[in-house]
């Protein structure tokens, strides 16, 4: 039976999660020559540091379709994606669309496919922060309710979908695909990356910080609360911040980038390999990224998350992640110093599978398409 899959990506988190799927497809095709796929890159993240470098490092083939959407307001950006993806789907007529994560590209692919009655598999389904003011939350909710197969990374994600009335037979807990990616590329990163030498860093000699969420970067006063805490920390600890374009632009707009760079080692966005090495060698990670929270756990590095809550509650329960609402510089600084003083790390645990999620997912997708009543 011939099967054609469409994979939609557009932003850094999508690229990381797509790589294991593409690797699994290549492996699967050794025995199933009729399995094919094509890749659509929306261009949601479009500069080299946020896009091209991931394709090169992770061996992701050149996308057959590059939409070059670029930045813009959520509605406009997502709408343009939907229209262009729909044209491609009409031309290619795939058997299933694979939608990954919670970006605008995730939702756009799902909407376009649903209008054409193309089944959707959502990878990283069921995650909830229970706050519809967060754009990613809206993307997750809508994509889940349009999908035929819901691949959840955790038990809690499965429970969320059951509460929302999803058919239990469509909810499949196969682990977290980001764990697959870390296992696949960790050793390669150690051999190839020279980032510690390039930045003059020593193992466990720095705090790695990232800030990019719209909620934390929409207003300069809010961003200053966070960055001022990093400045306070820099009196005792080296602080390194790969800076997201959104964060950089806001600081430049208010003439503050150079001032903060006097205290914080500000560097350009890092590729996947460099980021894995930085995460592994930091003494602490402070972030507002959902993906970095997990990568910190995979690399056994304590993490402080600057947000009101997290979808990855397992990491809090195991003691690897500390949630700190970024409401005051004093609270952030005090909380980070408290974590740094802890003499023990988190507990051992394997809440995200065995690193074979992509292969399990692909097997289920093929079974579903081969037996529509599956």
Image (cartoon, grey):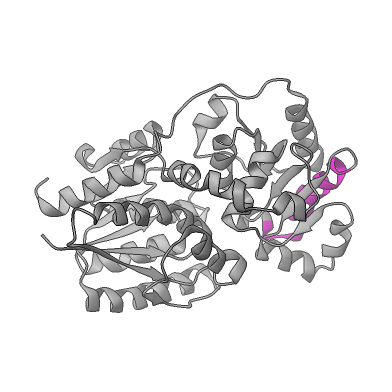
Task: Locate the C terminus by quadrant.
Answer: top left
Q: Position of residue 86 (x, y in %)?
A: 30, 75
Q: Position of residue 360 (x, y in %)?
A: 28, 42
Q: Main secondary structure of the magenta part?
A: helix
Q: Is residue 90 visible?
A: yes
Picture quadrant where residue 246 is located: bottom right
Picture quadrant where residue 153 is located: top left
In-image side of 246 versus 3 (left or right) = right
- Residue at position x 43%, y 63% in the image: 60
- Chain part drawn in magenta: 217-234
- Residue at position x 36%, y 50% in the image: 123
Q: Give the number of callouts.
A: 0
In-image side of 127 versus 122 (left or right) = right
Q: Is residue 256 visible?
A: no
In-image side of 102 versus 370 (left or right) = right
Tell me if residue 60 comes above or below residue 186 in the rendering.
below
Tell me if residue 317 comes above or below residue 99 in the rendering.
above
Q: Nearer the viewer, residue 284 or 72?
A: 284
In-image side of 138 versus 325 (left or right) = left
Q: Nearer the viewer, residue 166 or 3?
A: 3
Q: Nearer the viewer, residue 213 or 183?
A: 183
- Residue at position x 21%, y 41% in the image: 167
- In the image, residue 75 lies in the stretch drawn in magenta: no
Q: Residue furthest front?
A: 191
Task: Locate the N terminus by quadrant.
Answer: bottom left
Q: Position of residue 215 (x, y in %)?
A: 62, 54
């Amino acid at each position: 039976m011939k099967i054609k899959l469409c994979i939609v990506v557009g932003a850094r988190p999508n690229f990381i999660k797509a790589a294991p799927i593409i690797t699994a497809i290549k492996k699967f095709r050794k025995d199933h020559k009729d399995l094919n796929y094509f890749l659509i890159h929306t261009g949601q993240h479009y500069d080299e540091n946020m896009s091209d470098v991931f394709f090169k490092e992770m061996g992701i083939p050149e996308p057959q379709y590059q939409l070059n959407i670029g930045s813009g307001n959520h509605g406009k950006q997502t709408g343009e994606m939907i229209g262009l993806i729909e044209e491609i789907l009409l031309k290619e007529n795939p058997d299933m669309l694979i939608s990954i994560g919670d970006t605008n590209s995730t939702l756009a692919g799902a909407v376009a496919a649903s209008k054409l009655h193309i089944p959707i598999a959502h990878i990283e389904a069921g995650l909830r922060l229970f706050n519809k003011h967060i754009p990613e939350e809206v993307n997750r909710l809508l994509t889940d309710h349009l999908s035929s197969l819901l691949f959840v990374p955790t038990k809690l994600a499965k429970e969320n979908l059951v509460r929302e009335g999803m058919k239990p037979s469509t909810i499949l807990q196969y682990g977290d695909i980001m764990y697959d990616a870390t296992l696949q590329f960790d050793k390669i990163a150690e051999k190839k990356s020279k980032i510690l030498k390039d930045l003059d860093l020593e193992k466990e000699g720095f705090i790695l910080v990232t800030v990019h969420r719209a909620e934390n970067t929409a207003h300069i006063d809010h961003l200053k609360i966070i960055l001022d805490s990093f400045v306070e920390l820099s009196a005792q600890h080296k602080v390194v911040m790969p800076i997201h374009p959104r964060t950089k632009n806001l600081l430049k707009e208010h003439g503050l980038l150079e001032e903060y760079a006097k205290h914080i080692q500000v560097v350009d966005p890092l590729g996947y390999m460099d980021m894995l090495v930085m995460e592994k060698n930091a003494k602490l990670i402070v972030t507002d990224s959902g993906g970095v929270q997990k990568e910190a756990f995979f690399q056994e590095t304590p993490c402080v998350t600057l947000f009101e809550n997290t979808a990855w509650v397992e990491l809090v329960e195991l003691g690897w992640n500390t949630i700190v609402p970024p409401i005051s510089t004093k609270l952030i600084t005090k909380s980070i110093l408290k974590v740094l003083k802890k003499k023990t790390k988190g507990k051992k645990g394997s809440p995200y599978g065995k690193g074979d999620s992509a292969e399990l997912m692909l097997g289920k997708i093929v079974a579903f398409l081969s037996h529509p009543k599956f």
